[in-house]
């Protein structure tokens, strides 16, 4: 699971953590750590909500996909993808050294030869582990996550509407108000946030 608070953001020619950006937007001094725990919770919730909406990865993190039976070509689900795979297991055998990542029409695939045409043949189980997401994340995504995290706190001008509850496994839960009546909103994600996130959505199954 990605740690959104610690994720870095490309910001004004430098990089800062997402937590630091959130504190800046919330008019908090960087040395003021009194709200770090709560802001980190909001950021985790905002990040997971955003990744769920786009069905993709924002923060660089390790993911594993499981493929059953023959598929060719083998398209990777998430993007952007690092050029080097982390692990590949073919029917229980370590075959990492045999595989390469290549790109076609903006999508990422894996292949067993440099031409991108070699077929792996039939198999029962193929497990592929790789890193997907960005480090640092683009400024516009950092702003969306920080703004969404701040909106969870009603004291910071949070959203209004029916009370909902989100649970982050191993972290905790929080109840928040949604703005479901606002056109274009999705849960805690505002219409302006949705317009940015739409550019990062996974459009292919």
Image: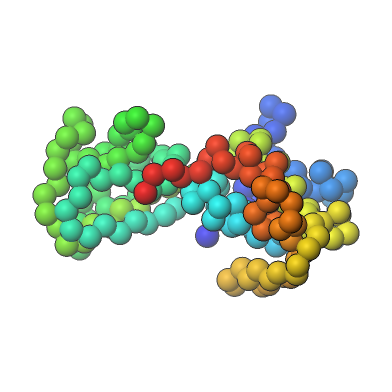
Q: Nearer the viewer, residue 174 or 32?
A: 174
Residue 85 visible in the shown view: yes
The one of 53 and 27 positioned closer to us in this rendering: 53
On the picture, is 128 further left or further right than 160? left
Q: Quadrant of residue 162?
A: bottom right
Q: How is the image coloured?
A: rainbow
Which of 165/93 is in front? 165
- What is the x, y in percent for residue 172? 67, 72
| Res 164 quadrant in image | bottom right
Tell whether 6 sits left or right of 116: right
Q: Could one spot residue 19 in this view of the protein?
A: no
In this rendering, is residue 157 above or below 104? below
Is 197 left or right of 189, judged from the image as shown?
A: left
Residue drawn 86% across the image and 54% down it: 156
Residue at figure coordinates x 70%, y 48% from the top left: 183
| Residue 76 on image: x %, y % | 34, 46
The total of numbered circles placed on residues is 0
Residue at (68% x, 51% y) in the render: 185
Nearer to me, 39 or 108? 108
Q: Give coordinates of residue 73: x percent, y percent.
A: 22, 42
**Which residue is outermost to the top?**
13
Q: Residue at x 30, y 34 (%)?
A: 102
Q: Residue furthest left?
A: 121
């Amino acid at each position: 699971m990605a740690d959104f608070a610690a994720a870095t953001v490309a910001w004004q020619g430098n990089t800062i953590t997402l937590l630091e950006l959130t504190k800046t937007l919330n008019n908090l001094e960087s040395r003021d750590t009194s709200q770090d725990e709560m802001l980190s919770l909001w950021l985790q919730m905002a990040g997971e909500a955003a990744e769920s909406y786009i069905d993709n990865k924002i923060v660089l993190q390790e993911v594993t996909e499981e493929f059953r039976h023959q598929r060719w070509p083998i398209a990777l689900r998430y993007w952007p993808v690092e050029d080097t795979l982390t692990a590949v297991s073919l029917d229980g055998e370590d075959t990492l050294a045999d595989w390469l990542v290549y790109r076609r029409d903006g999508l990422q695939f894996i292949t067993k030869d440099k031409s991108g045409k070699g077929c792996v043949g039939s198999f029962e189980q193929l497990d592929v582990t790789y890193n997907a997401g960005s480090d640092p994340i683009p400024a516009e995504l950092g702003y969306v996550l920080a703004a969404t995290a701040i909106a969870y706190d009603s004291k910071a001008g949070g959203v209004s509407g029916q009370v909902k509850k989100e649970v982050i496994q191993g972290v905790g839960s929080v109840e928040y108000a949604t703005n479901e009546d606002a056109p274009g909103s999705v849960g805690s994600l505002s219409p302006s946030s949705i317009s940015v996130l739409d550019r990062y959505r996974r459009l292919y199954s």
